[in-house]
Amino acid sequence: MISAVLATYNEEQNIGKCLESVRSFADEIVVVDGSSEDRTRDIAKKFGAKVIKTINRPMFHINKQMAIDAAKGEWILQLDADERVSKRLAREITAISKKASRYAAFAIPRKNLFLGRWLRKGGQYPDPVIRFFKRGKARLPQKSVHEQMEVKGKIGQLRGHLIHHTAPTFERYMTNANRYTSLTAEDLQRRGVKMNAISSINFLVAKPLVTFLTLYIRHKGFLDGFPGFVFALFSGLHWPIAFMKYWELERINKKQETRNKEQGTRNGKQEAW
């Protein structure tokens, strides 16, 4: 039995095509939806999906893990709503599910459509992701936006592709980028990164420059034309934007601590009277 699982939020433009690509082999579809305000849940139900409504958590891997935990299949395929399963991948998944396997999970190559172009360079292909695994053998750490599955056992490699419509428009890319930079800022806060000259130079200058040059020059992102340039540029800009959001979080926290101290002082004076 194969379970296809997803976590969604306002994905009415994508979820139908995603679920259409799995309906020929998935015995069960589980969708954990973060209280979408569009028709996402209705469309999922038309495909026979088990829909679980919850809140739209900033760390969306929590909802992804909820979907994994709710699955009953021996094999689980974890997807994003903007992904499609190619026919070759569907055949491979079906074949694996019908026989014993020495692998606990499989990495799947992914083709990323970015601003109307399939990215072949810039470190974006084959972009392997662990998405197909035996139930109970893999889980998400739920700590970082870019985390991979933690797997107990051997990992195999499939050849069929996941087709990822990551950013068909620049507007959608910026919407996702805003979410990712916020999560990175929260991660910096959890780690207690110092706000000083060294960290400022690192996040505002060094990391964005190294990221851009690595993707655009070392990994030949320039061969992907203008979309390749935009991807490398904004991948680098991820770091200063996240750092500035972190600075803002720290400033808000300090203001709140000051208010709390002032309130405590006033309360102490009142009790003294």
Image (cartoon, rainbow, N blue to C red):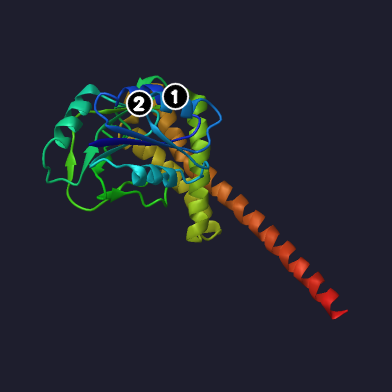
Q: Establish if 17 lies above or below 49.
A: above
Q: Establish if 116 lies above or below 36.
A: above
Who's the residue at 52% across and 56% down the image? Answer: 189
Who's the residue at 49% across and 25% down the image? Answer: 170
Q: Which residue is mark 2?
A: 19
Element under disc 1: helix
- The mark that comes first in sequence, 1 or 2, is 2
Taking the image as drawn, is residue 146 in sight?
no
Question: Would you say 267 lies left or right of 97 here?
Answer: right
The x and y percentages for residue 140 are 35, 49
Q: Which mark is residue 2?
A: none
Q: Which residue is mark 1?
A: 43
The x and y percentages for residue 241 are 54, 43
Q: Nearer the viewer, residue 92 or 156?
A: 92
CA–CA distance between discs 1 and 2? 9 Å
Element under disc 2: helix
Q: Establish if 147 lies above or below 157.
A: below
